[in-house]
Amino acid sequence: MYVVCKDHVELAIDMFVDEFEDAPDMVDLKETEFSDWDPPVKCAHCEQAGMYLVV
């Protein structure tokens, strides 16, 4: 599972496919709220705001 900015979506998808050998689902964090989990504020690869959850 990766929280990433718009610039790193492709990288996160590639990493997910390499690790799990399956296509990930993508969740837009602006449109989704989680009751038991607060997503990281920043991208896993840079200092930009995390916008997507690749899972």
Image: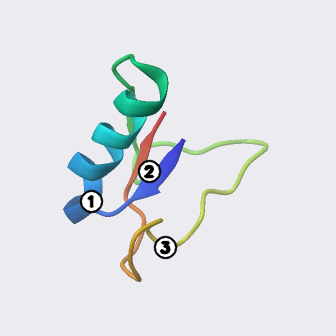
Which residue is more in the foreground, 33 or 25? 25
Which residue is more in the foreground, 15 or 25? 15
Judged from the image, the secondary structure of the residue bearing numbered disc 1 is helix
Answer whether labels 1 and 2 touch (C-beta < 8 Å). no
Query: Residue 47 placed where, x, y %?
Result: 41, 83
Identified by mark 3, the residue type is Lys
Mark before the other along the chain sequence, 2 or 3: 2
Identified by mark 1, the residue type is His
Q: Quadrant of residue 14?
A: top left
Q: What residue is disc 3 on?
A: 42
Answer whether labels 2 and 3 touch (C-beta < 8 Å). no
Q: Which class describes the residues within 10 Å of circle 1: few (<14), some (14-19), or many (20+)?
A: some
Which residue is more in the foreground, 25 or 10? 10
Q: CA distance from mark 1 to mark 3?
A: 12 Å
Q: What residue is disc 1 on?
A: 8
Query: Residue 1 placed where, x, y %?
Result: 54, 41
Q: Which class describes the residues within 10 Å of circle 2: few (<14), some (14-19), or many (20+)?
A: some
